[in-house]
Image (cartoon, rainbow, N blue to C red):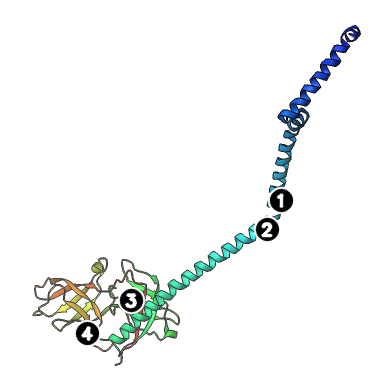
Amino acid sequence: MSRFFRNNGGLLVVAAVLLALVLAIGAQILGFNPLTNALEVLATPFRAASAAVSNWTQAQYDRTFRYEELAAENEALRQRVAELERDAIAGQDAVRENERMKDLLGLAEARPELQYRDAAVVRGASSNWTSDLTIDRGTSGGVEVNDCVIDQYGHLIGVVTEANPNSSLVTTILDPTLELGGRVARTDENAILEGDFSLMQEGLLRLSFVAEDAKLVTGDQVTTSGLGGVYPPGLVVGSIRTLYVEEDGVSRYAQVEPAADIAGTQYLYVIVDYGE
C-alpha cells in the first residue's frame, strides 16, 4: 500500500485538486453545495420529529388548560337551552290561558246571568260502571255540589257530586247514576236525561219518558230543562241520534249523543251561580 502511494501519490493529489476545482466550479455555476445538501438530508428527520413533538405538546396544553374553559361554555349552553325551554313552556301556557279567557268571555257574553270558574281536568276515571272526572277547583274556589260543568262552547259535561277544598269530582252526563231534566229545543218537549250502563260504553245517554205524541226527529237538539231549580236551563246536552219504542209498545225513548267531547276535554268551566 505504501509503495502504491509512493508511486502514485502525485497522481492522487492532482486528481483531488481537479475534483475540488470541478465541485467549486459546479457550485458557482449551478448553485449546488454538496455540504449544505448533505446537512439538509441529515436534518430532515430531526425537523419532522421536532414538529411532531411540538404538535403533541400543543394538544396536551389545549386539553389540560382549555378543558375547564370548554366545560364552562358547555354548562352555559345547557343553562341557556333550559331557559329557552322554560320560556317556550311559559309561552304555551300563556297562549292556552289567553284562549281560556277568551272562551270565558264568550260564555259570559252568551249567558250574562251565569257566573263561571275555569278549571282543568287532573284525572279521568271512567270504568264499566262509572264516568267521572277530577278537576283542580274546589270549595276554596267557590265550587259546590250540584254545580254544572260545561266545555268552552257551553256544552254540558256533567255535575259536581263531590267538592273538596282544592278539587272536585264531576259525574259526567254519561254516568248511570246521573239524572236531570231535559228538553227538546225544537218541540219544547220535556223528558228525563239519564245515563245508561250499556249506552255509556258507546258514549251515549238516554232521553226517557218521552211523550207518546211527541214529534221528535233525529238530530233534534236536547238541552237542560231547568225543572226542579237544581240545574240552570238551556245548557246544550247533545242531539237525538235514534228513537225507540219501549217494550210496552207505547212509551218511547231516544239515544242522545253528547255535544261535548267528554273523554277528550282538558279545560272546562264550572257554573257557580246561575242567577235564580
User: Judging from the image, what secondary structure is the residue with disc 2 in?
Assistant: helix
15 or 183: nearer the eye? Answer: 15
* Residue 245 pos. (x, y %): 11, 72
Mark 4 lies on residue: 225
Residue at point 84% right, 15% down? Answer: 14
Q: Would you say 173 lies left or right of 28 here?
A: left
Mark 3 lies on residue: 171
* Residue 234 pos. (x, y %): 23, 84
Q: Quadrant of residue 223?
A: bottom left
Specify the amino acid type for callout 3: Thr
Q: Earlier in the sequence, mark 2 or mark 3?
A: 2
Given the current orientation, which residue lies at the most extreme bottom position?
276
Specify the amino acid type for callout 4: Ser
Real-space Cα distance between discs 3 and 1? 70 Å
Residue at point 19% right, 76% down? Answer: 207
User: Judging from the image, what secondary structure is the residue with disc 1 in?
Assistant: helix
Mark 2 lies on residue: 68
Q: In which quarter of the image is the N terminus?
A: top right
Above or below — where is 190 with respect to 14? below
Q: Which of marks 1 and 2 is nearer the N terminus?
A: 1
Mark 1 lies on residue: 61
Q: Which of marks 4 and 2 is nearer the N terminus?
A: 2
Q: In which quarter of the image is residue 252?
A: bottom left
Dot 4 surroundings within 10 Å: few (below 14), some, or many (20 or more)?
many
Specify the amino acid type for callout 1: Tyr
In front of the other: label 4 or label 2? Answer: 2
Real-space Cα distance between discs 4 and 2? 73 Å
Real-space Cα distance between discs 3 and 4? 19 Å
